[in-house]
Amino acid sequence: MIHSVADLKTSCKGRVCEPGDEGYDYSKWAPNSMIPCKVVVTAEETEDIAKAIKAGPLVTGLPIAVRGGGHSSSTASATEGLLIDLRKLNKIRVDEETKVGYIQPGALIRDIEVETLKYGLGACVGVCSQVSIGGYTVGGGIGYSTGAYGLAADNLMSATVVLAHGEIVEASESENPDLLWGIRGGGSNFGVLAELRVKLHPQRADAYAVSYSFPPTRINEVVEEINKWKDVQKVHETVFMLIGLGPDKQPYVVINGVSNSSQEDGEAAFKRFLDLGPVNIINAQLPWTEACKLADPPNDIAGGKLICGAHIDTFDAVQVQKTFEAWEEMVKKAPISILLYEFYHYGKVAEVPVESAAFAQRHELMTVLCACMGIGDEYAPYVRDELLRLKSIVAASSSKDAQESLGYANYGDLFCTLNETDEYTKKIFKSNYPRLKEIKKKYDPDMVFNRWFAIQPSD
């Protein structure tokens, strides 16, 4: 029985640290989302997670939290109590014959891409290579492969899960299928994933990528051309429209595109954007392992960061222009703020019945990321309200459902820790919420896991 931090230190294979100990580290991608904690357990095996969960209330008397890759601007993966750090649980094993990846939750997307590509395969992972697979998957998981293969959550075949009292169980179609249903989009509400078994799919060794920059005066033409492209978008094509400051500190509208295809097919897909006459042109056939890092540069920015998502079902130039003007005001106070309109082929996601998994955002809405980065102390108190205002302008010409949406679940940093009631949790899980409440009652009735869109157990 573990009664103290000293007991935990001798019991765990991984390092257990208190403030002042060598290796004590509660850092995250966004420093404003960090909370100094009493204990950090850096798990190196599944049993470390179980011991930490059991010991948390005893050795700190405070809540536990779980940090995967730490790539979040919310405090959902931080606590003043005991922090379970999964970053050393990062092993990746590929079964080439069955096309299954056995991946620990702290494995980063960039490392997964490298390992699976050795076999001509790829997992359904995100576009930022610095994110770890665990939290990304249980929150839904969209990326370059979404068009062809759907969500990461829909490609999660089974998992080893450590439950609220330290039990280690399997979640699969044959064992605890309700738990598997819950972790396919239900986030960190039911336990800590110690290993994921995911479907792997054929992946070519290279892809075609473009980055075309336009002055803001060309917004109308850019929006019109993206809408035309969307009408013929293929499942292996993804386009982002970025609004941000360029190296010369001037605003630009940038089309970033990736075609998971040959150079010939990629050039044909994105020629329409080149024909618009961008002021800066970058295009190349890249190794896939490099293409998956293209979204990384904004993530290397130092200082405070806060993000929020929005959904739109109308992408029109008039509203984009209004949004640009609102962004212009924000960028005066936080110069590294960006707007990112994301155009994934969403058909594969939408064709899955909403009751098939916890992830409830099956409607074919377009995703928008609003990000404020490099936040200084003077502006920090106002960032949340500014982002909420920007989010409302982004969606103002869309349907009521889009306007009321909290955005893509993994972009829900403004809302995910507001768990005094389940108002926002209901908005994320919609019609799936009653079943999720039943699963919560079964696996975590005491709400040990309550940091991210906390599901309240049924009565």
Image (spheres, rainbow, N blue to C red):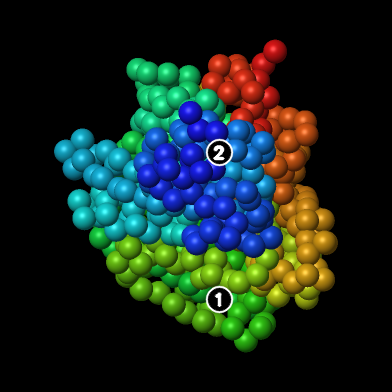
443 relative to 328, above or below = above
Q: Residue at x 55, y 66 (%)?
A: 299
Residue located beneath label 2 in the image:
4
- Residue type at mark 1? Ser
Query: Dot 1 corresponds to which residue?
Result: 213
Asked whether the viewer can see residue 65, the reply is: no
In the rendered structure, the answer to whether residue 415 lies left or right of residue 48 reads right
| 130 and 82: which is toward the camera | 82
- Residue 308 % position (x, y): 68, 53
Image side of residue 21 versus residue 269, left or right = right
Please identify the residue farthest to the left as the structure is shown. 97
Most extreme residue toward the top is: 459
In the image, residue 143 lies at what x, y percent?
Answer: 46, 50
Q: Residue at x 67, y 47 (%)?
A: 80
Q: Earlier in the sequence, mark 1 or mark 2?
A: 2
Residue 87 lies, in percent from the top left, at 44, 52
Q: CA distance from mark 1 to mark 2?
A: 57 Å
Q: Amino acid at mark 2?
A: Ser
Residue 316 image offset from top left, x and y in percent: 68, 56
Q: Is residue 138 above or below residue 303?
A: above
